[in-house]
Image (cartoon, grey):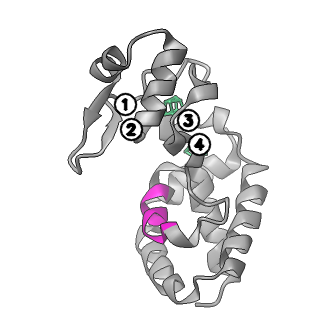
Amino acid sequence: MNPLIEEWNKKKNSVFSSNKKFLSKLTKHKSKALDRFAEETHDTVFAKINCLECAGCCSSIPPMVNKTDSARIARYLGISHTDFEKKYLKNDEDNDTVINQTPCPFLQNDNTCSIYEVRPKACRDYPHTNHLTFSSNLSYHAVNALYCPAVYHILENMKKNIPV
Ligand code: SF4
Ligand code: SF4
C-alpha cells in the first residue's frame, strides 16, 4: 500500500482535534497567498497519491448532485431525468440532494468512475484544496482529512510551514 495512505490510516483520528484548532486559527490568515500555498501543497501531495489506489471519497461520502448534474448524467445514461432522480438520488438530513447510496453506485471494482466525464461538480471539486478555494472551505478540511489521505497530508504540510 502507498506509505502515505498507510500513515493516514494510522494517524487520521489522532490529529482531528489539532487540525480543527489549526484551521480555526487559519481564518485570520485567509488570503490569496494562503490559497496559492494550499494549491502548491495540493499538487505536491497529489503527485504522490493516486486516487485510483484510494477511492475513499467515492466509497464513503455521497456527493451532492445539482439539477444541471442530474440532467447531464441522465442524458449520458440514456434515461429520463425523473428516472435518474428516482433511482440514484435522495435528500439528506440537510435537505441537500445527494447520491442515495455508499459506496457510490458509479464506482467500479477498479476504483474508476463509470460516469467520469459527466460526474457531479461536487466530485470534480473534491477535496476543495485547489483552484484557490482552500480558504473558503476551511470548515470542511478537518472532517475531510478523516476520509481523504491527501487532505490529511496537505494539512500536515501546512501545519509545519504556516505559523499560526
Ligand atoms: S460519481 Fe464517480 S466520482 Fe462521484 S462519487 Fe460516484 S464514483 Fe466517485
Ligand atoms: S479520498 Fe482523496 S485521495 Fe482518495 S480518491 Fe478521494 S480525493 Fe482522491
Does residue 104 sit above or below 148 in this rendering? above
19 relative position to 82: left or right: right
Residue placed furthest toward the top: 78
Q: CA distance from mark 4 to mark 2?
A: 13 Å
Residue 102's disc is: 1
The residue lying at 51 percent from left, 60 percent from top is 11
Q: Which residues are magenta?
A: 137-144
**N-term mark: 4 or 3:** 3
Q: Are marks 1 and 2 in contact (CB under 8 Å)?
A: yes
Q: Quadrant of residue 101?
A: top left
107 relative position to 103: left or right: right
Q: Is mark 2 within 8 Å of ligand 1?
A: yes
The residue type indicated by label 3 comes to Ala
The residue lying at 59 percent from left, 65 percent from top is 133
- Mark 1 vs mark 2, foreground winner is 2
Mark 2, other Cα within 10 Å: few <14 / some 14–19 / many ≥20? many
Q: In this figure, which residue is indicated by the disc labeled 3?
A: 55
Q: Quadrant of residue 151?
A: bottom right
Q: Are marks 4 and 2 in contact (CB under 8 Å)?
A: no
Q: In this figure, which residue is indicated by the disc labeled 4?
A: 124
Q: In this figure, which residue is indicated by the disc labeled 2?
A: 62
**N-term mark: 1 or 2:** 2
Does residue 86 sit above or below 144 in this rendering? above
Answer with the quadrant where ligand 2 appears in the image.
Answer: top right
Q: CA distance from mark 3 to mark 1?
A: 12 Å
**N-term mark: 4 or 2:** 2
**N-term mark: 1 or 4:** 1
The residue lying at 50 percent from left, 80 percent from top is 22
Q: How far across and down, in percent of the image, does residue 136 sit?
A: 52, 70
Q: How far across and down, in percent of the image, does residue 92 sit?
A: 24, 42
The N terminus: image quadrant: top right
